[in-house]
Image (cartoon, rainbow, N blue to C red):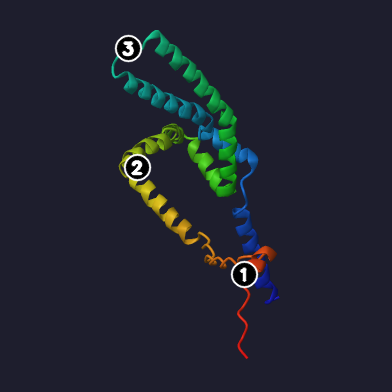
Amino acid sequence: MKRILPILLFAVTAATAALRAAPPSQPSVEKLATLMQVDKLHDTMLNNLMQSFDGSIKRVLRGAPPTAADQAVVAASRTRIVSLVDQGLSGEDIKAMYETVYTETYTQEEVDSMIAFYSTPMGQKIATAQLQVPFNISTEMQKPMARIGTQLQMAIFSAVQKVAQAHVPKAAPAVPPKPAVAAVTPTAAASQPAPAPKGN
């Protein structure tokens, strides 16, 4: 009995740890995605993209009012941008991606804890604010990257070139050509002077 007790205790501990590390259920990650307002990420991303596009147009116009032709180009471009975004990354695509990441990252216990928090008014307030965080960080990172972007590209290009040159197959040494041997034709042999006779 004394030997069996530690084995049973170990088995119970292992089973409890496995239960805690169990992946979350699909309904729970779907609920978490809803509470995290993942379905709004698509519209937030599209709005930020449109703001960037409109800012680029304003910089090009330099304060001048857009002409009718300009407005037609902008309207067509906005429609095209929306179509491309929907084709490449729809709201359902984003939601499915987040649910996959939640399943691979969190345990059931962690998902349950987050559901409990984001179900509160404060949790919903934070979830709404978090929608803009990735885009704001991206905007802030563009400032230092603009200063060092060219240097980074040069450093990467230089390293790639050095490695590539070190692995270029070396050409085989050139073999000097053999000296040409003139062919002796019967006519040429007949025209050669006969050797002088040796004296007795």
Alpha carbon separation for disc pair 1 and 2: 85 Å
Report crowding for label 2: few under 14, some 14 to 19, many 20 or more residues within 10 A (C-alpha).
Answer: few
Circle 3 sits on which residue?
65
Q: Are marks 1 and 2 in contact (CB under 8 Å)?
A: no
Q: Residue at x 35, y 38 (%)?
A: 142
x and y, in percent, of residue 190 in the image: 67, 67
Dot 1 falls on a residue whose secondary structure is: loop
Q: Residue at x 61, y 72 (%)?
A: 193
Residue type indicated by callout 3: Pro
Residue type indicated by callout 1: Gln
Foreground of the two, 87 or 102: 87
x and y, in percent, of residue 196 in the image: 60, 80
x and y, in percent, of residue 87 in the image: 58, 27
Circle 2 sits on which residue?
145
Alpha carbon separation for disc pair 2 and 3: 32 Å
Circle 1 sits on which residue?
192
